[in-house]
Image: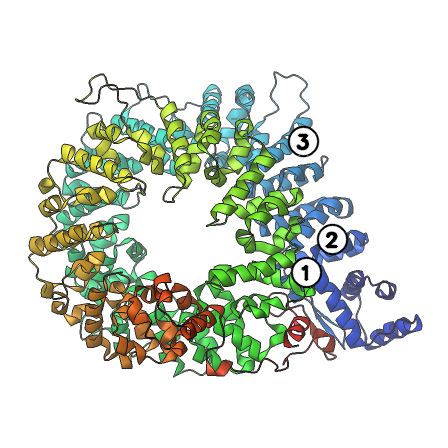
Amino acid sequence: MAEEIIEGSYLNALLDLIQFQSSQAWTADLSHRVLAYLNSQNVAFTIPSLQAAVENHLEQCLYQPQKLLQDLRKTDAQQFRTAMKCLLEDRRDHLDLGDVVIDLGAIREQALRSPGVNRTLFLVTLERCFQVLNSLECVEILGRVLRGSSGRFLQPDVTERLPRHLREDTFKNLSAVFRDLYDQTSAHAQRALYAWMTGILQTSANTSDDSVSWVSAENLWILGRYMVHLSFEEIMKISPVEIGLFISYDNATKQLDTVYDITPELAQAFLQRISSSGFDVRNTSTIHRLGLLVCFYDDLELLDAALAQVLLHQMIKCSHLRGFQAAVQKLKADLLGIATENRTLNETLGSLSDAVVGLTCSQLESLSPEAVHSAIATLNQVSGWAKSQVIILSAKYSAHEKVLSFYNVSQMGVLLAGVATQDFHSMDRKDLLQVLRSTISQHLSDLSPAQQQGVLSKMIEVGDTSSGIVEIQGSFFKEVSLFDLRRESQFNSSILKEKELRRSQALFLYELLSRTTGRPEELLSVGQLIKGMTCSHIDHLSADSFLAHFRYFENNLSLLSLDQVNCLAWKYWEVSRPSMPPFLLAALPARFLASIPASRCAPFLISLGKSRLDSLVSDSHKRDLVLRKVQQCLDDSIADEYTVDIVGNLLCHLPATIIERGISPGAWAAALQGLRDCPDLSPEQKAAVRLRLLEQCGLPQNWTAETTKDLGPFLVLFSGDELRPIARKFPDILQQTAFKMAGTLVSKEFLWAVFESVRNSSDESPSLDPTPGCQGVTAPSSDDIFKLAEANACWAPEDLLCMEEDTFIRSVELLGAVRGFSQPQLLTLKEKAIQVWNLPSFWREHHIVSLGRIALALNVSELEQLDLSSIDTVASLSQQTEWTPEQAKSILQGFLEDSGYSVQDLKSFHLVGLGAILCAMNITEIPLIRISEFRVVVARIGTLTCSTHVLAEFKRKAEEVFGDPTEWTSSVLQELGTIAAGLTQAELRTFDKELMPYFQPSAVKCFPDEIFKELSAEQIASLGPENAAAVTHAQRQRLSTSQLQSLQRALDGAKTHSWQEAPASASPTGSSSAGSPPGASIALGLWLGGPLLLLMTDLLR
């Protein structure tokens, strides 16, 4: 050990020490004997200086994991075994050397959290483990490392380093690791691992005759999910005996339940071989063994109703398939027809499994209430219901029950979302209380805001709030009003542990509870309460208390506002600069970043890469400055995979120039994995990624199926001409990619490629008996519409108009969800709805709800014809955000007239259901809203972006609830949201600067320019980074020079609070690790407290 210290091999010395300690006791004299020997060799060490040297070396290993790889390569067999044991055993070991206590558990924990260490362990295990350690131990190590890295190290070239000659048990265990990580493995790596596995299996099978298959039952079990990579020819060669053995094994069903990416062709091949093995695929027992193969069952000839029902029951699992869902839906429809042949739907409803979602609304309306009641145990578990279907079935069930009680509501499951808001409000309060306490409460999050308010308004009736509020759990609690919280006096932190909080609720509750507890951890341990901790609360924490509790902030960073993060950064800067987490520097003014020396770049990048930059910086200019520092640290390049690990989430923010030219070929595969997860790349970044992909993968026309799968989310970056070969060669992959992107906005060229691939593979042809004007037009089919998703926006209006009535009925909700439809397309679909359902005056609630965006095409006179007596119907319309003022006014008036309510009669759930339609109210109507109803939905109304005059009227209503604006608190400002933008110039000028961060950003944007300019420079400086970033260009234009300077200070995260006025020259309060006293515990602080003394010293110069 001493010789290794002399050579500077501190890791080896530490490993020797650990090994020594495992078998012998360390005595006090040993430390002195080691030091004496070192001194005799002219190597002068004291205990503290030796401790510091070891710490510094280990720190370098964490910041430079390539160095750790080099060190581990140099270890001998015993040292290597000790290193693997220390790093991968879940034990909290301490080495007590008398003068020094080494916390191996803490070192292990921080090492495995350090980017790059897992990669080093993976590489060194592949290189050395199978030569040095027991092969089963190596498989266990590989499994732990790979699972800890979500399989991202499994690149195609890994198989070149995997041993080819393994013991049978070792091979099976290693194959099991790869099977477990199948979903996290790229298509190319899957294919490479399959080749490695089959190479070993074929060798062990020792078959020289090509006509004899190496695929035995046992080999199929070993392959697991990799069996989908067998070729059609290989499957057809499997002997009947072996496939029979395989399918007879009980675990085969579990295995076949997980072949999510099997293709129809391969599934059919397996079904044929199973049939040839003597298993009757028409036998119920066999069908139960087929797993996902049942999704491709095609032997429907002479099938009886009972067997069709068995198949339908087994096909519930088909929703897990990766693609081919249109074919599955068609098969279910065919089986549904067989299952109901010669029997009525009322008789068979409970035996049709989830195929019932394929029933049309007219078929569901034909059901009797008794049939729905009898089948509720099946219906309440089915996923995939359309909203219109849920409304019909819930109404049928409620009609049978007459009065809703806890018992019958508890039977509804997923159908609970179809209960009318008024029916919830009419329930007995005790029954609703039981609902909140029972398992059915898990479905409350599926209710619309109006329905949730219907429940809440009943639970929290005037005169008795306590029991109702306490019983409300999870995200549902966010709907409780600040007014009701202020009336409740029995809150404690334990009651809040299972509840989600709005920021306004958290601000109020933290302030309330902090008065009665002196223990911050009691409040901070309730994760959501941390949203309510103000800068003042942070200020009042002592230095020791702040550092002791900082982990709560770090673990809940996503819950914090940018202002809170800024306050945390300043507080940390004040109390412990040397140990300050580097990511917090991004929340401070940009000048703090400029002085980070090159020697501290690694901890800075690692810390920042583990965070979300958007949670630290909102101003684009400041973000550019942060990224400039990142580029400087990277020297404008990413040299290897380790650098990809280190930059972490920062990868999504790197400029296009680095993506295009700065990422080395060796780092590209790892970088591409990271870029896949980036939610919002800029056009320039996307263009750079596309160029690199063309450079690395060649033209799309030459891509393999694996390349196309791996590039899935990046396919949207390519032009229509580039995608056309993909659409021809791999239409299924293209369509699956598009299906995963449903609900997101993608390029029109990508949608056209998807559209063409579906149309080219469609069996549809022009109708032989077309409607007038549809001669030669190939109208959309239900299958086409299902496959196309957002690409339905590519249909010409005349194609949509020629759609068959049954197709429209079955597909209307899918079409109503398409975001890209133009006004002419929406008008055409509205005309189709009138063709199918008659005039709007004949439409019922489920018709209107199913329209989605199509409803936007209704003109004022058509809206006037609708039956809008139900708030649930209106609530579905209010979800659309593109109504004209005239349309919105028509909907509002239609509701008031059809329901018979006047404005003063509106309940809180009516106000919530009206949503954005409330913005169409006349300013003379708003004062008529009852204050008792308004005060419990203030937060909901505060999410609306209404006109200035309407917001001003709502602000006057808010004064009736919360008093004069001079009395408003931080929680009130948060609760009001955009309503606060109705403040007058005089009122705004009187606001305390400490309250400025508690305006919501949406409110800041809504302030009229002429009012916003009345803020003082001091008030603007106190807005906080998030609100400052919300200031609009028009508002900026009206500000004076001093106001603009204050705005820049706020954007930069400059000091605004009195407690932040500590002089910049104050000396650090922490000390370096080199000064650790004897008896101190060695444990590196990489993420929470990495030694930043060098950094802080430079900043203070």
Who comes first in sequence, dot 1 or dot 2?
A: 1
User: Percent position (x, y) of residue 214?
Assistant: 62, 24
Task: Tell me the residue that label 3 is attached to.
Answer: 200
User: Percent position (x, y) of residue 853?
Assistant: 25, 44
Front label number (1 vs 2): 1
Task: Tell me the residue that label 2 is attached to.
Answer: 69
Circle 2: residue type: Leu
Q: In which quarter of the image is residue 459?
A: bottom left
Q: Which mark is residue 63?
A: 1
Q: Which mark is residue 861?
A: none
The residue closer to the viewer here, 632 or 700, is: 632
Q: Can you say whether 530 is above or below 670 in the image? A: below
The residue closer to the viewer here, 775 or 250, is: 775
| Cβ atoms at labels 1 and 2 below 8 Å apart | no
User: Percent position (x, y) of residue 585?
Assistant: 56, 68
| Local SS, label 1 | helix
User: Percent position (x, y) of residue 384?
Assistant: 31, 42
Q: Where is the N terminus found, in terms of image quarters? A: bottom right
| Local SS, label 3 | helix
Residue at far right of view: 40
Circle 1: residue type: Tyr
Residue at 51% in and 35% down? 709
265 horizontally vs 633: left or right:
left
Q: In which quarter of the image is residue 1010?
A: bottom left
The residue closer to the viewer here, 352 or 101, is: 101
Would you call the spot at circle 3 few (<14 residues within 10 Å), some (14-19), or many (20 or more)? some
Q: Separation of disc 3 and disc 1 at Cα? A: 39 Å
Residue at 54% in and 42% down? 689
Q: Separation of disc 3 and disc 2 at Cα? A: 29 Å
Q: Is there any visible trace of residue 151 in the rendered image?
A: no
Would you call the spot at circle 2 few (<14 residues within 10 Å), some (14-19), or many (20 or more)? some
